[in-house]
Every structure is written in structure tokens, then in C-alpha cells.
Image: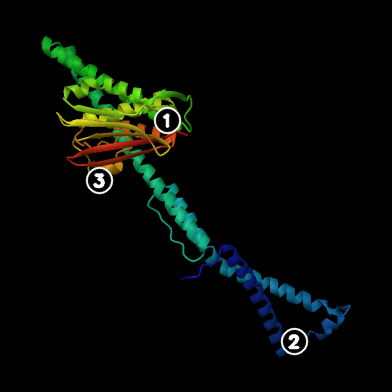
Amino acid sequence: MKKQWGLTISLVLFVFGVMMAAVILTGVIFIILSIIGVSFSEHAQQDYIGGRPFGMILSMMAVSILLGTTIAAFFSKKALKPIRQVINATRRIAEGDFNTRVELKGMYELEELSSSFNKMAQELSSVESLRRDFINNFSHEFKTPIVSIRGFAKLLKEGVVSDDEKQEYLGIIITESERLAVLSTNVLNLSKYESLETIADKTPFRVDEQIRRAIVIIEPEWSAKDLDVDVEMDAVTYNGNADLTQQIWLNLIDNAVKYSNPDGNIIIRLKHANGGICFIIKDNGIGMDEQTISRIFDKFYQGDSSRTKPGNGLGLTIIKRIVDLYGGKIDVKSELGVGSEFSVWLPTV
């Protein structure tokens, strides 16, 4: 196993080495000068004070300082090379090159610096990718309904449509307007939740009753698909923010209905578990592949790339943020063509 020297020990050894080298070289120089006939005896005798040859000592000190400075300046270039690498890499990061990495070997502190720098660069790269995806997806989600509204409004303005077409176009305009309103609300909510550090306004409320209300609210959607909703819940009282937790159940139930096949079934469970409450919702719908599962909580990400399903890809992102604020966990299991299962655990403390 390669021995790693700490930065402090290395600096001490470097200074000690420079000092020893300067002293040795100074001694060698004076010996050589003595050999070639340069005598310091007369000067030494004149400078004796209390038995010490101060002239010779001062001369040796001056030479040692000069040599030490020269040696330190020469070897410091190599010693400072890792720092210069980090400076150059930081400059490239500042210019937008987030693929920059540094590899510093040897001392423990330098390897730690290298590892931390590379992690920072990776995080910045991920944030930049998310930013680009956010802008692209938001632009798409925002532009599509606006283009649709504008197109049908122009047709209505031209006045060459039948009454049936007029009602159809007005219906589309209303639907797209509602879609924009939902998108704006979700973006504002996500922005608000991301700025929160803790959950305020906590009060006790019945979670099972809250979930039943969410099921009733979405009843028209699951009834239209003839879905069988199997509900089994313990009576659970939870101390939290009722408005925030309501969004968890509404989004998860709505997603289960949205991605279920007609005549399918949805299983909903609620119970106490591991010092908290556990909510489970399972469907036998279209399911998800591994790539979709890995990105399901990203902003605006939709596993249905054809966008045939309604939604804007913010619902699960909002759920994840709310669960994180509670200090809870959300897990997903899914398989294409089999269905998906989401489980949410919230601590009671």
C-alpha cells in the first residue's frame, strides 16, 4: 500500500530540507574557499567578541539565506504545480467547461482536493443539464397550448366555421387555457416548495379521510375507465400541513388512474410503519422501464415521450420535494406492461 504523506508533514520536510541543503552547501563553499587559499583567520581574529568569530558567522548566515532562497524558489515551482492545475481547472469551469477534471496524486490532502473538485464539477454539469432540460421542456409545454389557442381563435375570428365546429374550437381553447393555468400553478408551487426549508402550520388531521376525499375528487376519471379501486386503510392521525400532504395523494392517485388500462385495478393501502405512516398505491397499467424510473422525479420529465397522456411532468417533482421536506422517503417499483407501485413513508416525529 502506497504511503501517503500529509500536506503538513510534507511542508515541514520541504522547509527542513531547504535549510539543511543551504547549510551543507554553505559549509562546502567555505571549505572549498579555504582549500584554494582564501583565509578568514585575520578577519576572524578581528571580529572575536567573547570568543565568537562573528564575522565568519554573519558571512555564513548571509550565504545560507541566499542559497536557501534560491533552492526554495527553484523547487517551489514543482511544489505549487498541483495548485496551478486547480486554478486553471477552476478558470475553465468558470468559462462553462463543466467536463473539466483534475487528477492529483500523492499527498492525502491533494487527493481529497482532487476528489472534491471533480464532484463539484460533476454536480455543476448535472445542474446545467437540468437547467437546459427545464428551459427546453418548459418552452415546449408553454408554447404548445398557446399555439393551439391562437390557431383556433383565428379560425373563430374568420367566422367561416359551423356552430358545431365553433363549440369544438371553444372547448379546445378552454381546455388549453386550463392546461396553461395548471402549468403556471405547478411551476409557482414548485418554486415555493424549493425555497422552503421546513414545513410550517402543522396541525393534526386524519390522513385516511384526506385520501378518501382525493379518491372521490378523481372519481370521474377512474369511473370513465371502469377501474376497480381497492382501498384498505388504517385510521391514521398525522401532525403536518394538510394542504401539502393532500397534493401527494392527489398526484399519485391521478397518475395511477392516468396510466392504468381500462378495466384495470388500483390498490391503495395506508398503515403505521417504522415510526411513521406508509402509503402504497399500486396499479396494473403500462408500467415504466429503468430509464424512466431513474428520471421520474426530474422536472418536466415524462416517460410518455409521445405526450399522448395529459400532464406537464411536474407532479412527481412536487411530490418528491414535499416528501423531502417532511424528511420522508418515496420509492417506486415498476415493470413495463405489468404496472407501477409507489410507496411514501412520512415520519411521525
Mark 3 neighbour density, 10 Å: few (under 14) some (14–19) many (20 or more): few
Residue drawn at x 71%, y 83% is: 30
**Above or below — where is 196 with respect to 16?**
above
Q: Is residue 268 visible?
A: yes
Residue type at the position of mark 1:
Tyr
Q: CA distance from mark 1 to mark 2?
A: 83 Å
Circle 3 residue: 290
Disc 2 on helix, strand or loop?
A: loop
Disc 1 on helix, strand or loop?
A: helix
Mark 2 neighbour density, 10 Å: few (under 14) some (14–19) many (20 or more): few
Q: Quadrant of residue 221?
A: top left
Pair 1/2: label in front: 1
Residue type at the position of mark 2:
Val
Residue drawn at x 47%, y 70% is: 2
List x then y, in percent, for residue 69: 65, 69
Pair 1/3: label in front: 3
Q: How is the image coloured?
A: rainbow
Q: Quadrant of residue 246?
A: top left
List x then y, in percent, for residue 212: 31, 23
Q: Earlier in the sequence, mark 1 or mark 3?
A: 1
Q: Is residue 314 visible?
A: no
Circle 2 residue: 38
Left or right: 94, with 235 as reference point: right
List x then y, in percent, for residue 279: 33, 33
Q: Nearer the viewer, residue 112 or 250?
A: 250
Circle 1 residue: 193
Q: Earlier in the sequence, mark 2 or mark 3?
A: 2
